[in-house]
Image: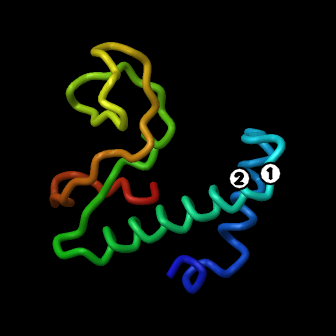
Amino acid sequence: MLNTCLGEDFAFREATTLQSTLEIGEKRKTMMVEMIKEFIAQAGEVCFQMAISDPALCMDMSLFGQEVKYSSRYQSLDGFIKQNEDCVVILPSIHKVSSAAPSKLGE
């Protein structure tokens, strides 16, 4: 779906740019670019499904990668994090769009 909407090269170009900036897995650059590309495609699919949902759904995209202090507001991947420890948001909460709140989808 992402390739159809944004062009086949979009995810690859963005993944390559991200990899060159972050230099993740230096010895396995090609594999890391593919993994980042897959993440971008999956994130795009989530955004597409949110946009066509009835009622529409939204998330605050500015929270991606934000460093926060852990609290019960967040879900832990491994279950071992403690209250007030540093963590990174990898998928912000998704909510129904209300007429009173502006959508954060893609803003």
Which residue is rendered at x = 30% and y = 16% of the image?
82
Of 49 and 98, nearer the camera is: 49
Which residue is rendered at x = 48% and y = 33% of the image?
66
Of 66 and 26, nearer the camera is: 26
CA–CA distance in space, label 2 to label 1: 5 Å
Where, by quadrant of the figure, is residue 78 drawn? top left
Where, by quadrant of the figure, is residue 3 drawn? bottom right
Residue 6 appears left or right of 100? right
Q: Residue 98: x and y, percent?
A: 16, 58
Q: Secondary structure at mark 1?
A: helix
> Looking at the image, is 68 positioned above or below residue 98?
above
Q: Which mark is residue 29?
A: 1
Which residue is rendered at x = 26% and y = 22% of the image?
71
Asked if marks 2 and 1 touch (Cβ < 8 Å), the reply is: yes
- Kind of residue at disc 1: Lys
Of 26 and 100, nearer the camera is: 26
Which residue is rendered at x = 57% and y = 86% of the image?
4
Label 2 sits on residue? 32
Q: Residue 21: x and y, percent?
A: 77, 42
Where, by quadrant of the figure, is residue 26 drawn? top right
